[in-house]
Image (cartoon, rainbow, N blue to C red):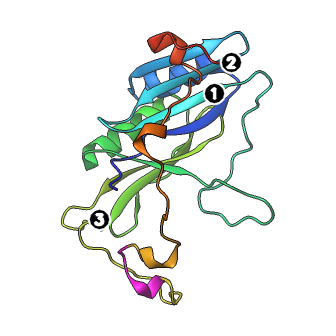
């Protein structure tokens, strides 16, 4: 099995038009799919040839309170921020200038050793980071663990330790593999959701 990227991140908004203005018009990501019916919309923006970010629009959804990226919290919590890669250092600075010109607060450019990043929030309060890889340092090809106090599991290395989970004893036979119609199937190939 090989993963080929982030198919899509699914976020939520109470204002799809404001979301489109930010992600498509300010950041320049193409709006490539839109599913919807009264009271429900699900739109997809293209990040790269294999990656998308999507938004559900639900009536009554409110922007979250802004939280500083990486600041610890207590209690139930599920999401800190998402980082989008840019091709060049110049792209990072152009994006910083564009966000500031549009009235969005943007951090200074931060050097994390293997990436340079800026931090901001979209109109929904979603904490976003934009990162450029530092030339000559590719942690995907050459993983580097710089934790001063790594756990025992961390010390097992970068490669998946597949023996830690049960093996599949009975895989689903090809003849029983069925993809059931879901939202959007009626729009793209006429299959109705039951």
Q: Is residue 172 left or right of residue 10?
A: left
Task: Mark 3 or mark 2: name the one nearer the start of the chain.
Answer: 2
Within 10 Å of disc 1 (Cα), the crowding (few <14, some 14-19, many 20+) is many
Contact between labelled residues 2 and 3, with CB atoms less than 8 Å apart: no
**Residue position marked by numbered label 1 in the rendering:** 56
| Residue drawn where x is 29% and y is 35% of the image | 49
What is the span of residues highlighted in magenta in the rendered image? 154-159
**Residue position marked by numbered label 3 in the rendering:** 140
Q: Secondary structure at mark 2?
A: strand
Q: Which mark is residue 30?
A: none
Q: Is residue 109 left or right of residue 14?
A: left
- 125 in magenta: no
Measured in 3D between alpha carbons, the distance from the residue under mark 1 to the one under mark 2, in whole angstroms, is 7 Å
Contact between labelled residues 2 and 1, with CB atoms less than 8 Å apart: yes
Could you say where residue 133 lies in the image, as x and y percent from the top left?
29, 57
Q: Secondary structure at mark 3?
A: loop
| Residue drawn where x is 41% and y is 55% of the image | 117
> Vertically, is 104 above or below 143?
above
Q: Is residue 54 left or right of residue 57?
A: left
Within 10 Å of disc 2 (Cα), the crowding (few <14, some 14-19, many 20+) is few
Measured in 3D between alpha carbons, the distance from the residue under mark 3 to the one under mark 2, in whole angstroms, is 38 Å
Q: In what quadrant of the picture does the C terminus appear?
A: top right
**Residue 95, quarter of picture:** top left
> Vertically, is 32 above or below 144?
above
| Residue drawn where x is 34% and y is 56% of the image | 1
**Residue position marked by numbered label 2 in the rendering:** 40
């Amino acid at each position: 099995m090989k993963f080929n990227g982030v198919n899509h991140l699914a976020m939520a908004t109470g204002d799809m038009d404001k979301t489109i203005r930010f992600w498509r018009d300010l950041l320049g990501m193409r709006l490539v799919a839109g599913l919807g019916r009264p009271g429900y919309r699900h739109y997809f923006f293209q990040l790269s040839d294999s990656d998308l970010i999507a938004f559900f629009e639900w009536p009554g959804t409110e922007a979250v309170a802004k939280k500083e990226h990486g600041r610890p919290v207590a209690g139930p919590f599920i999401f800190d921020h998402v980082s989008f890669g840019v091709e060049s250092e110049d792209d990072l600075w152009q994006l910083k200038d564009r966000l500031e010109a549009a009235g969005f607060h943007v951090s200074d450019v931060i050097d994390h050793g293997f990436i340079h990043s800026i931090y901001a929030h979209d109109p929904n309060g979603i904490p976003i980071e934009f990162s450029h890889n530092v030339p000559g340092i590719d942690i995907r090809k050459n993983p580097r663990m710089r934790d001063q106090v790594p756990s025992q599991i961390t010390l097992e290395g970068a490669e998946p330790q597949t023996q830690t989970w049960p093996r599949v004893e009975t895989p689903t036979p090809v003849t029983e593999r069925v993809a059931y119609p879901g939202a959007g199937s009626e729009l793209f190939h006429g299959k109705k959701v039951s």
